[in-house]
Image (cartoon, rainbow, N blue to C red):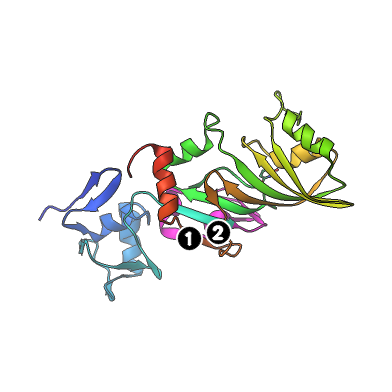
């Protein structure tokens, strides 16, 4: 019997059945030949039974588990991740953990972070394989706002608020776009909320540096409509909820 995934409105729908090697391939486990090699060494569990035959026909309702993870066939994956300090937003790093060490391995190949956070920055990081959504959220044209909580050395003043709002020279060709600084506490060291609409390298740290302050702690709280889920501990992730999926539709201007 012919078995294929039909592409409909951006998501795969399972028509009848599909060979196990193709299924694993589509789930991002590896190429067809890699998957065949893997199956020689370790089985996948389909509805509780070990299966090693690459030609096994997986049915739409089957539960497929590989290395203790339930595989999914969705074309697009969206995660909210609470990035801990000490890991980098890169796919490979010889020294530090990458953020991809925290998310399910079966989709790692095509996932990327939406924007980057520094090694020592914590907080909200969106991870997806949806290129259009990624593009819309990072496009300078959209000027999506990012909100950070920052702790800095020195006393923050109304003059700093004014300077942030006026667009600071942070050492690039062009000054930074106006940013909002909301002082939360101010004494020998201070804390504040910062809202920026660009995604320049070390932007928040450089904004403070331009005012003579050094960031000692930085955490991203929001990106557009997306907020850090405080129930996620650093290092934890979850899939987008329904409300967040509505925002995805809004950014893509379509149904998904
Ligand atoms: N600005 C910074 O300086 N660092 C980050 O990680 C994000 C924004």
Q: Is residue 245 left or right of residue 210?
A: left
Among the 4 quarters of the image, the one containing residue 232 = bottom right
Q: Which quadrant would the N terminus be assigned to in this image?
A: bottom left
Q: Residue 189, position in %: x, y?
A: 85, 52
The answer to whether residue 12 is magenta is: no
Q: Tell me the residue at 54%/43% (across/down).
A: 224
Tell me which image quadrant ligand 1 sits in. top right
Q: Residue 249, position in %: x, y?
A: 39, 43
Disc 2 target residue: 229
Query: Are there few (<14), some (14-19), or many (20+) residues within 10 Å of tag 2?
Result: some
Q: Residue 182, position in %: x, y?
A: 73, 44
Disc 1 target residue: 238
Q: Is residue 124 left or right of residue 187?
A: left
Callout 1: helix, strand or loop? strand
Q: Which quadrant would the C terminus be assigned to in this image?
A: top left
Mark 1 against mark 2, which lies toward the viewer? 2
Compared to residue 182, the image places residue 48 above or below, namely below
Query: Are there few (<14), some (14-19), or many (20+) residues within 10 Å of tag 1?
Result: few
The answer to whether residue 97 is magenta is: yes
Are the residues flagged by discs 1 and 2 in contact, CB closer than 8 Å?
Answer: yes
Q: Is residue 250 left or right of residue 32?
A: right
Q: Earlier in the sequence, mark 1 or mark 2?
A: 2
In front of the other: 144 or 123: 144
Inter-mark Cα distance, 1 to 2? 9 Å
Q: Residue 33, position in %: x, y?
A: 31, 54
Span colored in magenta: 83-111
Label 1 lies in ligand 1 vicinity (Cβ under 8 Å): no
Q: Tell me the residue at 37%/57% (across/down).
A: 29
């Amino acid at each position: 019997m012919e078995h294929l995934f039909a592409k409909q409105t951006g998501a795969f729908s399972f028509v009848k059945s599909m060979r196990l090697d193709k299924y694993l391939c589509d789930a991002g486990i590896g190429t067809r030949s890699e998957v065949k090699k893997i199956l020689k060494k370790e089985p996948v569990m389909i509805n509780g039974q070990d299966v090693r035959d690459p030609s096994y026909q997986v049915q739409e309702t089957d539960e497929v588990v590989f290395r203790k993870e339930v595989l999914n066939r969705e074309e697009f994956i969206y995660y909210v991740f609470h990035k801990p300090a000490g890991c980098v937003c890169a796919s490979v790093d010889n020294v530090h953990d990458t953020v991809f060490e925290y998310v399910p391995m079966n989709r790692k190949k095509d996932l990327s972070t939406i924007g980057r956070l520094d090694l020592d920055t914590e907080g909200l990081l969106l991870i997806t394989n949806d290129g259009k959504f990624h593009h819309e959220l990072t496009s300078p044209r959209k000027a999506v706002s990012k909100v950070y909580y920052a702790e800095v050395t020195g006393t923050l003043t109304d003059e700093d608020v004014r300077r942030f709002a006026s667009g600071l020279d942070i050492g690039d060709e062009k000054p930074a776009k106006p940013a909002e600084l909301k002082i939360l506490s101010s004494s020998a060291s201070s804390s504040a909320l910062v809202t920026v609409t660009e995604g320049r390298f070390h932007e928040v740290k450089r904004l403070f540096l331009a005012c003579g302050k050094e960031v000692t702690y930085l955490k991203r709280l929001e990106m557009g409509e997306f907020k850090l889920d405080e129930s996620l501990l650093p290092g934890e992730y979850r899939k987008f909820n329904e409300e967040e999926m509505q925002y995805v539709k809004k950014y893509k201007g379509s149904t998904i």
